[in-house]
Image: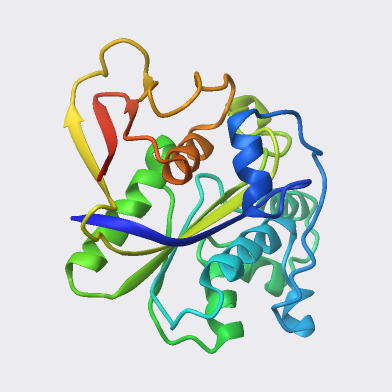
Amino acid sequence: MGFSVQRWAAWAPGLAHPADWEAWLAKPHPLPAEGTPALTEMPSMMRRRVDRLGRIALQAAYGAHADAPDAPVIFASRYGDLGRSVELLTQLARSEPLSPTSFSLSVHNAIGALYSIARGDTASYGAIAAGEETVEAAFTEACGLLADGVPRVMVVVYDEPVPSPWEHFSQDVAFPHAWACLLTAGTEGNTVRLGCAAGPSPGLDLDLDRAALEPEPAGLPADLRILRFLVSGASRWEHAVGARRWRWERHA
């Protein structure tokens, strides 16, 4: 099953508009570590409950969804809101009372629930975390929904640096960011297909169609390499994870 990207949006400190993102993805440079979107699309009473990571994810979701009809939404984050979890665990270790609101918002699907409630959207939503393959898992789920006849699906990918004391487990997210794509079934001349094969990728772990892009910048997180492929027009990109090789292909 193939898909087409009908609309996309992304947000990070210092990057808010698609044109800015396209320029940055071509030539990445250091971005501010701090920053929070205004998220004016969400009612203020609800907005005040959302932490920075949630605001960033929701800003990308609102930007990609815009005025499109309601659609299933898949929120994908490898780590989720670990900062809130650390705060709760610290309070627990100190025998301090826990905030029920903070606890309810620490679960992985909380951001999606807030989005659904704020929009009054009765379409389904889900939350996915699948390690290094989180983005591929989310798009596989989206392709399944499209194959079942759903007219459009939105995927929202978001993460931020892992907080202390867990930062030594992972340093692959350098700054908070989120991106979202509104997907429809693939159309003739504009279809992206995602496949998976066993075995390591020959050569580099991340293989890019060099005819379509400049040599790939070093240090770009895997999820942003996928966004780069989706918005660039490149014809092929591979992501090797353990014993699997994910292949993203564009068919003209």
Q: Residue at x 78, y 46 (%)?
A: 14
Nearest the viewer among 34 and 166 is 34
Nearest the viewer among 45 and 119 is 119
Compared with 134, 71 (above or below) is: below
Residue 224 drawn at (x, y percent): 53, 38
Q: Residue at x 59, y 35 (%)?
A: 25
Compared with 46, 6 (above or below) is: above
Nearest the viewer among 175 and 250 is 250
* 250 sits left or right of 28 in the view: left
The quadrant of the image that shows the N terminus is bottom left
Residue 207 occupies quadrant:
top left
Residue 222 drawn at (x, y percent): 48, 33
* 174 sits left or right of 155 in the view: right
Inspect this view and state whether residue 82 appears.
no
Compared with 91, 237 (above or below) is: above
Residue 24 drawn at (x, y percent): 66, 36
* 111 sits left or right of 186 in the view: right
The quadrant of the image that shows the C terminus is top left
Residue 167 drawn at (x, y percent): 67, 30
- The total of numbered circles placed on residues is 0
Looking at this view, name the residue that lies furthest to the top. Answer: 203
